Image (spheres, rainbow, N blue to C red):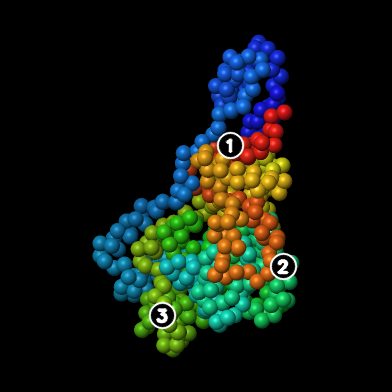
């Protein structure tokens, strides 16, 4: 007889009660603990009893647990509220501005010359297209695998999204990018999304864009702390955007930053964000007044700059980015190594592009296509029942599934992306969890796969 334990078959020859007791006595203590009750029941029932209900791991922690705000950020936010000076420009000068200080610290961390803090990353993505020169109706190439906020920002900016296939490493497919650049000769912009912090071959992407005179823009919402060949992400393209939404590396509830080394783009962004009547002087990480010139009268004010309270919350988090990156990556390494060891025949882990230094604050894996759609759903149900919600990127309700973007539908079939999404799974790795919680995470994932495949005659 064989039972499933941690994704491995444990073989027992049940011939007599004495032999059973002998086998159990040789089991490691960790195995005995989980199967003790089931084993005792089997012994009492006689030699033909089967261990069909092993004890299952259950997680009680909240997978949505965000990173907390350091006390210094709370103190500064409370201080601002006590004075009432929460408005981004209600300060004497740029040196007194909490928002400007935050912009300086973000720019220093990423290595960009200019930075404008905004109310969301969606606003940053929308504005970087408008500031780069997008006109109504212009085509914008982008990953077919990304979050719905990206095509939403393209639509918001007045553009038309054209999707490029994504592969099983969850990054843009370079061959399809080359193909789409030829098929859409009027396309002027490529907005690449570093989904879940995964970078494609950025040298190849830039080379393809340059050969077709396409401006490269980078959505770095998920890639704060991620590097490409030793330089922070967001420097290959002309402009980049990062996020301060609750589930990102910096948490202000909602927020974003536009980053660039281009003076004109930075000036335009500051004006769009609300720098009217000379208020650009209360910015630090923008160019001088000669670049702004008559821009405040030429382009509209959308009032999108970040509030002082959000900036105060963010500032101390910038100081711990590298420390948290190390912790995330260590836990990710443990989880992925365990999954591959125990279930490598049923799943694969996306491979990082050579040249990329990652920040693994979440886990993605691709289930085998040998697993049926029904078994995939059973796996999702089993995981959720045992305290670990697993997202399937290709689920009919997932905002990362391009078929759900009816406001910006694909013009062409995207078979590679669709097939990948149908087996691509996503799990957060909350910073505030303990190391033991990640051991339980691995157990729940493996045990849930076993349960999902049990109908395929797990027991011989």
Crowding at dot 1, Cα within 10 Å, few <14 / some 14-19 / many 20+, comes out as many
The residue indicated by pointer 1 is 443
Is residue 357 at least partly visible in the picture?
no
Query: Is residue 451 something that shows in the picture?
Result: yes
Chain-order first, disc 3 or disc 2: 2
Could you say where residue 124 lies in the image, as x and y percent from the top left? 49, 70
Answer above or below: position of 66 versus 273: above
Count of numbered circles in the view: 3
- Disc on the earlier residue, 3 or 1: 3
Q: Quick one: 363 or 114, which is closer to the camera?
A: 363
Dot 3, crowdedness within 10 Å: few (<14), some or many (≥20)? some
Instruction: Indicate the secondary structure of the residue bearing disc 2.
Output: helix
Report which residue position mark 3 lands on: 301
Q: Is residue 411 left or right of residue 72?
A: right
- Between the residue at mark 3 and the residue at mark 2, the CA separation in whole angstroms equals 38 Å
Are the two marked residues, 3 and 2, in contact with CB atoms closer than 8 angstroms? no
Q: How far apart are the two marked residues, 3 and 1, measured between alpha carbons?
A: 52 Å
**Label 1 element class:** helix
Which image quarter: residue 24?
Answer: top right
Residue at (68% x, 64% y) in the render: 414
Q: CA distance from mark 2 to mark 1?
A: 38 Å
Determine whether label 3 and label 1 are within 8 Å by CB: no
- How many residues crowd mark 2 within 10 Å: few (<14), some (14–19), many (20+)? some
Q: Quadrant of residue 49?
A: top right
Q: Horizontal and vertical percent for residue 447?
A: 60, 36
In the image, which disc is placed on residue 4? none
Residue 119 in the figure: left or right of residue 393: left
Badge 2 vs badge 1, beta-carbon distance below 8 Å: no
Residue under the image location 54 percent in, 34 percent down: 57
* Residue sitting at x 50%, y 38%: 59
């Amino acid at each position: 007889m064989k039972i499933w334990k941690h994704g491995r078959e444990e073989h027992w020859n049940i011939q007599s009660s004495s032999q059973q007791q002998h086998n159990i006595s040789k089991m490691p203590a960790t195995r005995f603990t989980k199967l003790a009750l089931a084993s005792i029941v089997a012994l009492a029932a006689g030699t033909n009893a089967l261990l069909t209900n092993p004890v299952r791991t259950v997680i009680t922690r909240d997978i949505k647990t965000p990173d907390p705000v350091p006390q210094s950020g709370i103190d500064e936010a409370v201080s601002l509220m006590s004075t009432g000076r929460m408005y981004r420009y209600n300060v004497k000068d740029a040196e007194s501005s909490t928002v400007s200080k935050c912009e300086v610290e973000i720019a220093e961390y990423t290595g960009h010359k200019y930075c404008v803090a905004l109310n969301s990353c969606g606003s940053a993505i929308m504005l970087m297209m408008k500031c780069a020169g997008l006109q109504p109706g212009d085509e914008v190439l982008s990953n077919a695998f990304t979050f719905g906020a990206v095509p939403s920002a393209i639509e918001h900016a007045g553009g038309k999204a054209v999707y490029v296939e994504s592969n099983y490493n969850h990054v843009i497919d370079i061959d399809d990018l080359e193909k789409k650049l030829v098929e859409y000769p009027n396309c002027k912009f490529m907005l690449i999304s570093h989904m879940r912090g995964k970078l494609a071959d950025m040298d190849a992407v830039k080379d393809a864009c340059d050969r077709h005179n396409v401006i490269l823009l980078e959505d770095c919402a998920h890639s704060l702390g991620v590097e490409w060949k030793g330089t922070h992400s967001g420097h290959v393209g002309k402009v980049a955007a990062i996020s301060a939404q609750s589930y990102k590396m910096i948490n202000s509830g909602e927020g974003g930053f536009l980053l660039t080394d281009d003076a004109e783009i930075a000036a335009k962004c500051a004006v769009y964000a609300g720098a009217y009547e000379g208020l650009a002087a209360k910015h630090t990480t923008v160019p001088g007044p000669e670049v702004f010139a008559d821009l405040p009268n030429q382009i509209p004010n959308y009032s999108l700059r970040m509030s002082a309270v959000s900036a105060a919350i963010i500032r101390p988090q910038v100081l711990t980015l590298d420390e948290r990156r190390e912790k995330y990556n260590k836990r990710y390494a443990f989880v992925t190594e365990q999954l591959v060891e125990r279930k490598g025949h049923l799943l694969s882990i996306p491979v990082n592009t050579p040249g990329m230094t990652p920040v693994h604050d979440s886990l993605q894996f691709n289930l085998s296509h040998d697993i049926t759609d029904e078994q995939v759903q059973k796996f999702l149900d089993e995981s959720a029942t045992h305290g670990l919600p697993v997202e399937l990127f290709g689920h009919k309700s997932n905002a990362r599934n391009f078929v759900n973007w009816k406001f910006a539908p694909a013009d062409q079939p995207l078979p590679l992306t669709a097939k990948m999404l149908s087996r691509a799974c996503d799990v957060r790795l909350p910073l505030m969890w303990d190391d033991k919680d990640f051991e339980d995470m691995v157990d729940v994932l493996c045990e849930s796969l076993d349960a999902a495949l049990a109908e395929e005659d797990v027991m011989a």
